[in-house]
Image (spheres, rainbow, N blue to C red):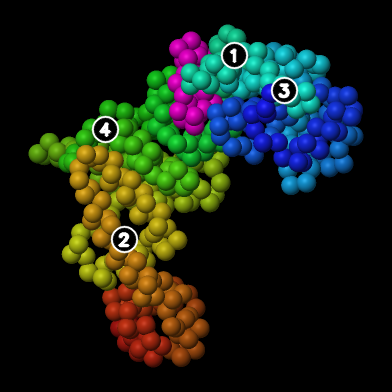
């Protein structure tokens, strides 16, 4: 008897017993089998069965009809959710996204034949404990190859998202794409416009947190996907840079993305997009030197338009765009402590850590072989840490006075003048932290009103 490719949790064993007692098949399919054979852990247990959706919903007390039109029901057992899909054979794909109609099947082989890549068409029989690999997916796993099942062009014509997924799997697994599969991607790009923005963004997010996102983006470039998906990034190819930069804007951006922490999606995305405004603002001055004036501002606008196009969450869009907007600062060790505090206040404490991480990746990708490329940034980080430890006021809410005090004691009326006065008092405290005392702030406010009020 073979050993299962992954550890089978007790909740899944319970599901298997239910299917077996109903004389139904129950197979573990998809990523869990693939990752298990690669020695990777997985908590994503997808099941395939010959029981139709209505029967599955009768067999289990707690279910969700997640995609019942296409045969998928989510079974809830204990702490687990098992996405369970009835064996099926797909009809024609006329919209390049999903089959026009689905016919249920009693044969797991038919179900596996409709899948995208050989490495995703391996199944484990949870009842009879045997592995089924009709498309030699294990051999492709061994050789680290992504290969479409059957005729690659047909697979990509059926669903345009599969071309993006091929590149995503390459970056996730460190695999190469089979030559015929690569050719088919480039020849079946016409159905990309039919893919929803949300589906594309989900794939891009998975690429961002893969071990090496640059793998996918280089494959995008090679296959023609980049020009269609991220034309703004495609325009960065071949754009040379000045100073210590040894890479063009495209290669520099990819390296910065790879160097950013894998678990931090906003920073990874910001690293890819941080210089995306450069092609739009590139000029040469009178001496012939390349200048990218205000590329950070333009880049933030371009980044926001990309994230709006792909319907990223408001939180992701705001954070990624702000990181791009603030990534250009020219710190030198002669900055005064007040200058550091003003910088911290301008950026915002909620952004500081991520901004420093972004700049470290950016600096490291400028001249990869240059020693101490990040020394000045690490000095700034030490100074920021010292200011934070001192609990210095860095925002209006940190002041030991508030708008109500100013209105009650100084007679300031609500409105723009109140906000302007509070900003002035914060500037004073950023310059001299010891000024953050209630009475001193009142005196400074009174003097300001005598001049400007």
Mark 1 falls on what kind of element?
loop
Say which element carries label 3.
loop
187 within the magenta span: yes
Q: Residues within 10 Å of mark 3 (few under 14, many from 20)?
A: few
Q: Is residue 95 left or right of residue 293?
A: right
Residue 439 to residue 338: above or below: below
Is residue 28 found left or right of 425 in the rendered image? right
State which tag comes first along the sequence, 4 or 2. Answer: 4
- As measured in the structure, the alpha-carbon distance from the residue carrying label 4 to the one carrying label 1 is 40 Å
Mark seen at residue 389: none
Labels 4, 3: front one? 3
In the image, is residue 188 above or below residue 228?
above
- Magenta residues span 165-188
Name the front one of labels 2 and 3. Answer: 3
Q: Earlier in the sequence, mark 4 or mark 1?
A: 1
Give the residue at mark 4: 248
Secondary structure at badge 4 equals loop
Residue 342 visible in rendering:
no
Disc 2 target residue:
381
- Which residue in the structure is indicated by mark 3? 1
**Percent of width and height locating residue 276:** 35, 38
Q: Nearer the viewer, residue 356 or 343?
A: 356
Q: Which residue is mark 1?
A: 136
Judged by depth in the image, the label closer to the viewer, 4 or 2, is 2
Up the image or down, 362 lies above or below 176; here it is below
Nearer to us in this view, 217 or 131 = 131
Residue at image position (21%, 39%) is: 369
Name the image quarter holding the C terminus.
bottom left
Q: Is residue 147 magenta?
A: no
């Amino acid at each position: 008897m073979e050993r299962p490719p992954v550890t089978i949790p007790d909740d899944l064993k319970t599901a298997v017993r239910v299917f077996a007692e109903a004389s139904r098949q129950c197979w573990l399919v998809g990523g869990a089998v693939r990752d298990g054979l690669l020695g990777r852990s997985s908590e994503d247990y997808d099941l395939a069965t010959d029981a139709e959706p209505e029967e599955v919903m009768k067999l289990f007390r707690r279910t969700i009809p997640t995609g019942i039109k296409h045969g998928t029901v989510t079974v809830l057992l204990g702490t687990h959710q098992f996405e369970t899909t009835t064996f099926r054979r797909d009809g024609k794909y006329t919209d390049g996204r999903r089959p026009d109609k689905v016919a249920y099947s009693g044969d797991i082989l038919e179900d596996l034949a409709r899948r995208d890549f050989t490495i995703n068409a391996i199944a484990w029989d949870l009842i009879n404990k045997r592995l089924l690999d009709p498309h030699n997916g294990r051999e492709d796993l061994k050789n680290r190859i992504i290969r479409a099942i059957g005729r690659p062009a047909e697979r990509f014509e059926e669903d345009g998202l599969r071309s993006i997924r091929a590149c995503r799997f390459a970056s996730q697994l460190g695999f190469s794409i089979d030559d015929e599969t690569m050719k088919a991607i480039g020849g079946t790009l016409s159905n990309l416009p039919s893919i929803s923005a949300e589906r594309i963004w989900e794939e891009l997010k998975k690429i961002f947190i893969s071990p090496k996102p640059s793998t996918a983006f280089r494959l995008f470039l090679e296959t023609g996907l980049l020009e269609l998906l991220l034309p703004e990034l495609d325009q960065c190819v071949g754009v040379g840079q000045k100073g210590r930069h040894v890479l063009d804007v495209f290669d520099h951006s990819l390296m910065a993305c790879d160097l950013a922490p894998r678990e931090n999606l906003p920073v990874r995305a910001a690293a890819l997009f941080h210089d995306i405004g450069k092609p739009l603002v590139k000029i040469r001055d009178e001496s012939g030197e390349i200048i990218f004036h205000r590329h950070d501002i333009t880049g933030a606008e371009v980044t926001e338009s990309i994230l709006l196009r792909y319907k990223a969450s408001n939180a992701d869009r705001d954070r990624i765009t702000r990181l791009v907007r603030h990534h250009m600062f020219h710190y030198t060790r002669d900055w005064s402590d007040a200058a550091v505090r003003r910088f911290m206040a301008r950026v915002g404490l909620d952004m500081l850590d991520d901004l420093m991480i972004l700049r470290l990746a950016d600096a490291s990708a400028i001249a990869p072989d240059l020693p101490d490329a990040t020394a000045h940034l690490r000095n700034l980080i030490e100074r920021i840490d010292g200011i934070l430890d001192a609990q210095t006021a860095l925002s209006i809410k940190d002041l030991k006075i508030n708008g109500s005090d100013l209105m009650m004691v100084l007679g300031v009326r609500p409105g723009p003048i109140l906000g302007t006065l509070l900003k002035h008092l914060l500037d004073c405290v950023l310059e001299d932290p010891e000024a953050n005392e209630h009475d001193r702030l009142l005196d400074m406010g009174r003097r300001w009103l005598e001049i400007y009020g």
